[in-house]
Amino acid sequence: MKKFKFTISGNDYEVEIKKLEDSTAKIEVNGTTFNVELHKEERASKTPVLVRSSITNPKDSHKISKTSDVLFKIKAPLPGNILQVFVKVGDEVAKDDKLLVYEAMKMENKLLAEKPGTIKSIKVQPGDSVLQDDLLIELEVN
């Protein structure tokens, strides 16, 4: 099969591999035949190891703090036209109060307050056309 020449401690050896099967081989060293057992060499993976620095969390980062005033954005659920606005900036509204009426898909739809709060800003007026998810009203929730 293959022939090799080795020098070990100043001595020369001619090695010929005669037969190779699984983990055994028949070799000839300087005319003498040997049956040898082959050991597979374990090679280290060349895949790099990703090393990241540890993450430090700020003190009390596990606690959720609620602010006193939260801005709730009311958006258009469908594209349509604003027909009537029932509130103005500064008005206090309760849950389920009527905020505006808009026309979408040839139907009039009432938009009701989902939470109690104060009207912070109104971004539309009667006659405006809106697209889905357009901002209509900002409500400051207390």
Image: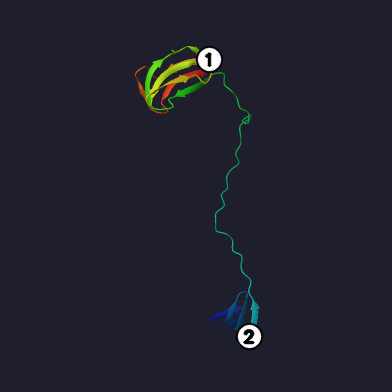
Q: Quadrant of the N terminus?
A: bottom right
Looking at numbered disc 1 in the image, what kind of residue is underneath it?
A: Ala
- x and y, in percent, of residue 12 in the image: 59, 82
- x and y, in percent, of residue 56 in the image: 61, 36
Q: Quadrant of the C terminus?
A: top right
User: Which of marks 1 and 2 precedes in the sequence?
Assistant: 2
- Which residue corresponds to the image point at 57% horizontal and 59% vertical from the top-left? 45
**Helix, strand, or loop for circle 1?**
loop
Instruction: Identify residue for label 2.
Output: 33
Instruction: Identify residue for label 1.
Output: 94
* Colour approach in the figure: rainbow
The quarter of the picture where residue 43 lies is bottom right
* Cβ atoms under marks 2 and 1 closer than 8 Å: no
Looking at numbered disc 2 in the image, what kind of residue is underneath it?
A: Thr
Q: Against 5, is 44 above or below?
A: above
**Helix, strand, or loop for circle 2?**
strand
**Neighbour tally class for label 1: few under 14, some 14-19, many 20 plus, Cα within 10 Å:** few
Count the numbered circles shown: 2
- x and y, in percent, of residue 123 in the image: 40, 19
The quarter of the picture where residue 65 lies is top right
